Amino acid sequence: MEEFLIVRTSALGDILHGMPVAAALKEHFPRCRITWVVDERYRELLAGSPWVDRILLIQLKEGARAVLRKGARKNWRGVARMLGRLRFDVAIDLQGLARSGLITYLSGAPIRIGFPREFVREALNGMFMNLRPRRIPSRGHVIDRNLALLHPLGIDTGHARFPLWEPSATEEGMGQHPAGRQGGGDSLRIVVNPAAGWVTKQWSPHRFAELADRISAEWDATVYVLWGPGERGLAEQVLARMQRPGRLAPEMGISALAAFLRGCDLFIGGDSGPLHMASALGVPVLGLYGPSDPVRNGPFRDADRVVYAAASCGPCYRRTCAGAWCMDAISVEPVWKVVTEMVQALADGSGKTGG
């Protein structure tokens, strides 16, 4: 087997969680070529990966409606033609949607591996697959579930590697952002991320502000408030509620975000792409979880920590909720306790005194 296709078109954290699949394929088939189909918005994430040889871009920003636009239809036809020319041996669908299944089918690969029906979001996905693993960890981390798709190929890693990657612009951006190590100083750099993909995953801005003030006062730390597209207002709410100075993180693309996170000592936030990127980069992470299960979707490294509101109705994976009970149930005190433990671990490991 020499030509492999991986289909995981989005989003940031999910693509990161698929990278161990590419790493495992390269480890077991050193001469293989791996092609990855991805939404054009995430090209930077794969561009620096040593495990991906070719990237095929597709336009999915507008979802299914995109096929109604002439330019998007042209893009899909171009992807289909390219897939047909590449003659894949194996195609692996890490997404479990109807469209990802269709892309897998269009590859023409004689072996098309996907998740069993109970693990896919859209049942139509199953009609495009012809091979599935016998076992998927029922409550395993999503990385372990992804790696289980390699079992039909005789690949059983036994352990999951969460590989780092190096987007091409990462090191160039280090000195351009306020958390870059070239900026000098030895104070703690702590980033809080009040946003998440779903509003139900978000902790309240006033609690982030209270936590940031305590961090700043206790260790004279620099606290950065992170934001992404459409999220600046939420970040500014946190800053407006803070009694001590905080810093708004700059607007960043994926490579610049990686550089920014590398310059930080601790990441605090809900289940989000930046959280998983920080964990992949080896930055200590404290995740705040409610509607999603930290066993399945938490930060992957053993050194990372989680505060989980295990509500009776959760984990529900609901994107909307009238009460948002689970995240509201997380008070500042348990989060503060874990933060102090993590900062002490940083001091023990790096020699910092913390103030």
Image (cartoon, rainbow, N blue to C red):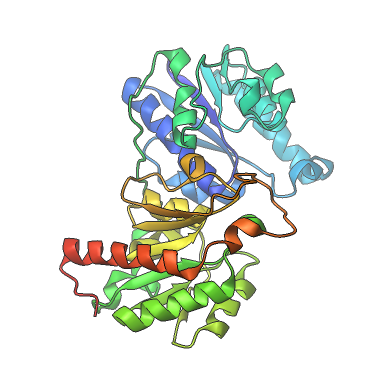
State whether residue 317 is above or below residue 332.
Answer: above
Name the residue: 37% across, 32% down: 23
Q: Pick the quarter of the image with the C terminus.
A: bottom left
State whether residue 152 is above or below residue 181.
Answer: above
Q: Quadrant of residue 151?
A: top left
Q: Quadrant of residue 78?
A: top right
State whether residue 55 is above or below residue 264.
Answer: above
State whether residue 8 is above or below residue 348.
Answer: above
**Is residue 278 among the parts visible in the rendering?**
yes
Q: Quadrant of residue 94?
A: top right
Q: Please provide percent x and percent y for residue 85.
A: 59, 22
Name the residue: 60% across, 78% down: 237
Please tell me which residue lies in front, 348 or 179.
348
Name the residue: 31% across, 50% down: 303
Name the residue: 41% across, 58% down: 286
Is 218 left, or right, of 90 in this rendering? left
Please tell me which residue lies in front, 13 or 108.
13
